[in-house]
Amino acid sequence: MPAPPRPRSGPFHVRRQIRSPGSVIALALFGGVVPVAAQAPVTTSSARTADSTRTTPEQRYGDWVRRLDFRPQEYAFRRSNMIRLLRDSGGGVLLVPASDGRTHGETFRQLEDFWYYTGLEIPSSILVLDADRDRSILFMPETDHRFEDSGRPNDFPGRPLLGDYQLRSIAGIEEYRGMAEFDRFLSQRVRGRTVVRVNGGAPGALVEPELPAFGALDPIRTMTLRIRDAHPTVRMANAFEEIARGRMVKSRDEIQKLRIAADATAQAISSAAGVIRPGTDERSVRGAFEATCRALGSQSIPFTPIVKSGPNSLWPWRVLAAHYDRRNRPMESDELVILDVGCEIDGYVSDVGRTLPVGGVFSDVQREKLLVSTRAADAIIAAIRPGITFRELTRLAYEAIPDEEERYMQTPSFFGHHIGLSTGDPALIDEPLQAGMVFTVEPWYYNHDLQIAVFVEDVVVVTDDGVEVLTRDLARTPEELEALVR
């Protein structure tokens, strides 16, 4: 499922700053006045009173996070590699924001670029990768606002960040500064004509953000807008291509995490298949899938599991999601049900798809159309090797698709997408494949004339001499899929 990046709130969801005694506050785009991430710490008499009544010890980052997901050396390599890519393409400083840390009860998930380069789960921070001075700087708050509530000091005892030297030792970044220093740092670099670079989300020139009539900007566009407002002469550039080149090739440890996520997803699909029968509704299948993911260690589900049967199977997920209660129909015996689903374990995701017969047996036409999708996938997988491009793989897929079926299998680029920390990891469509790249292969088939849709999706990793299919043990042939349901 080529999922768009998840919208996340960030530390720069502001339009303009307003100064008041003792602090800097910001007028939010919607919802009133909120603290800016860059505000200086303020000590008040009420805060001192709260300190005197607190009985719970002040918390430390190391009390909650014992280690990073990877060795510090791997994060250091990622940062130095990105600095090299920036230097080779013109230099400047790359700004990588963290999430603002606010959730609505769901498990916190860091913004992916910040997570990739630091491994840290801290809020309202900015990593600066300085290609002109070959240096990494982490601007972070004095304290973690999520651990603070002046009315409940016993339950929210506070957690220092900037002054926590154990946290610094975990991260291994070269320099740490308070967020209150960031604006001054940026002003100095802008005056010096340094190019300020951000992840624009797609190749090409950096698109100037505009406030939407509905909804909100994502963290990068919000940050870009704020920088433009505060520094009209700033020179900004897009670093998406450099970020994609760095993140497209996974390390050995990343591939192992993706292998674990793919295996968990395969097991969860097999479990969900066990509840498929006439009369069962789609959400019950989804529930069985999610339960197995959680049992196998998933901290989060990377996207809402897509379970669609009968007439629902004919529509892409964006269309089905347009209405509140569309995705819960009871399945009927002669129908197909498509699972397009994934587990997430330790930050790395999977995205796998299978088509199953609700009644346990494919009809002749259903079997025939399933094989159209499967053979196109097989043609792609057989050709994967270092040096080939997605466009070449797409051409080979269409050679395997019968002419009369091509209208039902449309794609603007490639039947798949890179995965890693997200189901839409940054990628360049014309970049030759390299060993270590991980992506999906998913030739979808939507035949509205016959009212039949089928779908098979596998996760593959490019090796030195070919390809490894991470989902190879999951039922895939018509006979295997029928046996999975029976």
Image (tube, grey):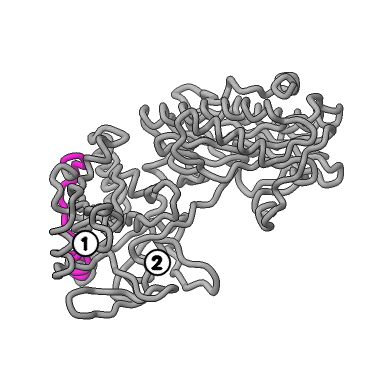
Residue at 44% across, 24% down: 464
Range shown magenta = 169-187
Q: Main secondary structure of the magenta part?
A: helix
Is 300 situated above or below 213? above
Which residue has dot 2 on it? 222
Q: Is residue 128 visible?
A: no
In percent of width and height, residue 403 lies at 80, 38
Residue at 45% across, 47% down: 426
Image quadrant where one finds the C terminus: top right
> Crowding at label 2, few (<14), some or many (≥20) Cα neighbours within 10 Å?
many
> Crowding at label 1, few (<14), some or many (≥20) Cα neighbours within 10 Å?
many
Q: Quadrant of residue 396?
A: top right
Q: Amino acid at mark 2?
A: Thr
In percent of width and height, residue 456 lies at 67, 33
Q: Amino acid at mark 1?
A: Met
Residue 33: mark in rendering = none
Q: Is residue 113 left or right of residue 407?
A: left
Judge whether residue 180 is colored magenta: yes
Q: What is the secondary structure assignment of the residue under circle 2?
A: helix
Please report whichever mark, 2 or 1, sits nearer to the chain's N-terminal start: 1
In percent of width and height, residue 211 lies at 47, 73
Residue at 24% across, 64% down: 194
Which residue occupies the foreground of this view, 157 or 447?
Answer: 157
Image quadrant where one finds the N terminus: top right
| Separation of residues labelled 2 and 1 (CA atoms) | 17 Å
Judge whether residue 291 is colored magenta: no
Which residue has dot 1 on it? 179
Question: Do callouts 2 and 1 mark residues in contact (Cβ within 8 Å)?
Answer: no
Is 288 situated above or below 138? above
Residue at 43% across, 41% down: 421
